[in-house]
Amino acid sequence: MSVRKLTANLLMALVLLAGFNSVHAQHGGHIPIATDPLAFDPDFRWFEPMTDLDFVDLKPAQRVKTGWFATYDRLYLYGSRPEVDDPNSTDRLLDSGWGNRYEVGFVMPVEEEGWIFTWTETSVGEFFTVPRERLNRFNEAQLEGEPDPAQPPFGFPVPAADGNTGGLNTRTYFIQDSDNVVDYNSYELVKTWRMEPFHYGGILEPTVGFRWMRINDLNARQLYVSALDIDQIPPGGDPPLDEFGDAEQLITDGTFTDNEILTGQVGFRYTRWRDRFRYSADFRTFMGGSLQNSKSSRLTQITIYDGTGAGSEVDNILTRQTTPIYTSNEEFSIGFDVRGELAYQLTRDVNVRIGVQVIDVAMGVWRGGSQDPSRNLLLGGDMDQDLVLVGGTFGVTLNR
C-alpha cells in the first residue's frame, strides 16, 4: 500500500471517530437507534380518569398516541342486490346485514410511522320464503310422545327426518329463493406515516398497502310439488312424481360464487380534536384483479308416503345430487372505502365512537348465479358487477 493511500485511510478514520464522539456527547453518551415496536412496555393505566383541564393544555401533537393500539367496531351495513334478469325481483335496492371490524397496529414514537392490520367481515342474507305443509301434515307418534320404533331421546321419531319441524307441530318445508345473500371479508395491511399538525390542529396520516377481499355470493331457487298438486310434473322434473304415487318432491338449485380480489391500496386518515371529542375521516382506494370461481348443482329430494292423509307414514326418502359444474373467470376490480367517525374520550386511553362507512367494490364482482340458465332453474348473473355496503358503525378504541 502506498504512503498516500495509507494517509488517506487514516484521515478518514479520524473524521469518522470525531463524528462518533460528537453524536455520543450530544445524546448523553447514548447512540439513538430506531424504535423497536416489539418493546411493548405499557403501564396498564388505560382506564385512568381525565378531566377537562387535562385536555386544555394538550397540543394536537401531544394528543396523538404512539405504541400499540387496537379497535373494535360493530357494523350495521346495507348491501346492494345482485343484478339479474328476474321478472319477479322487487324494487328494493339494499338489504340490511351485520358485521364486525377489528384493527390492530402500532406507531413508533421517534419515527412517527407504523403498520396497521384491519379485518372487516359482514354478511347479508335476504330470502323470499313460502312455508308449505308436507304431504302428511304431521307426525302423530311424535305428538303423542310415543315414537315408533321407541328410541331415545323420548318423544322423537327415528329417523329424525320423519319428525315434525322444530318449533312447530306440523311437518313443514320453508321454500326459499335467495334475493340477496352475500358474505364479505376484507384483510388489509398498510404502512402509515404521521405528518406534522396543520395550523388548526388537524393531523394527516397517509397510508399505502395491500388489500385482499373475499366476496362469496349464493344464488338459490327451490321448487316444491306433491301428489296433491294439480300439476304433478315440475319443469325439468326427473322423474315425474306420478311414477311414485303418494309422494312429494323438493328441488334445490344453487350456485355458490367465490370472488377472490387482490388489490393494492392507497389512502389517508385525517384527525382533529375538540375537547374530549375527536373527528376523523378515513379514505382508501384500491385497484387490482378479481379471481372468480362458481359451483352450480341441483339437489332433488323425493319423499314417498303410504297415503296422502294427515299422519301418513314415510315409506322412503330418495335423494339425488347432480355432478357440480365449475366455472372460473378473471376480471379487473376497483373501488373505495370511506369512513367518518366521532369519538368521545372516556379515560386516558379508551374512547367510544360512532360513524358511517361506505364500501364500494365498483366492478369485478360475480353475483347472481350461473351464466347458463338452461342448466337449472337459476338465473344468470353478470360476471362484472359491483357490491355496495353502506351503513353505521359503533365501537371502542384502545390507545389510539
Image: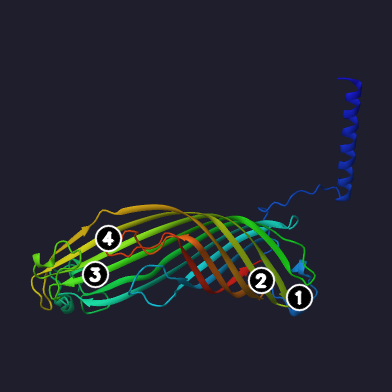
Judge from the rendering whether residue 204 lies leftward or rightward of residue 239; answer left or right.
right
Rate crowding at label 2 as few (under 14), some (14 to 19) or many (20 or more) other CA atoms within 10 Å: some
Residue 75: percent from left, percent from top: 52, 71
* Distance CA(mark 1)–CA(mark 2): 18 Å
The answer to which of marks 1 and 4 sits earlier in the sequence is 1
Residue 243: percent from left, percent from top: 9, 64
The reply to whether dot 3 and dot 1 touch (C-beta < 8 Å) is no
Any part of residue 64 in sight:
no
Q: Kindly identify the amino acid type of the residue bearing the numbered disc 2.
A: Ser
The answer to which of marks 3 and 1 sits earlier in the sequence is 1
User: Dot 3 corresponds to which residue?
Assistant: 223
* Distance CA(mark 2)–CA(mark 4): 51 Å
The answer to which of marks 1 and 2 sits earlier in the sequence is 1
Q: Kindly identify the amino acid type of the residue bearing the numbered disc 1.
A: Phe
User: Dot 2 corresponds to which residue?
Assistant: 280
Closer to viewer: mark 2 or mark 4: 4
Which element is circle 1 on? helix
Q: Kindly identify the amino acid type of the residue bearing the numbered disc 3.
A: Leu
Residue 86: percent from left, percent from top: 34, 70
Closer to viewer: mark 3 or mark 1: 3
The reply to whether dot 2 and dot 4 touch (C-beta < 8 Å) is no
Closer to viewer: mark 2 or mark 3: 3
Q: Which residue is pictured at 72% across the width and 60% down the height?
A: 194
The answer to which of marks 3 and 4 sits earlier in the sequence is 3
The reply to whether dot 2 and dot 3 touch (C-beta < 8 Å) is no
* Distance CA(mark 3)–CA(mark 4): 16 Å
Please name whichever residue, 76 or 110, is drawn nearer the observer in this view of the structure: 76
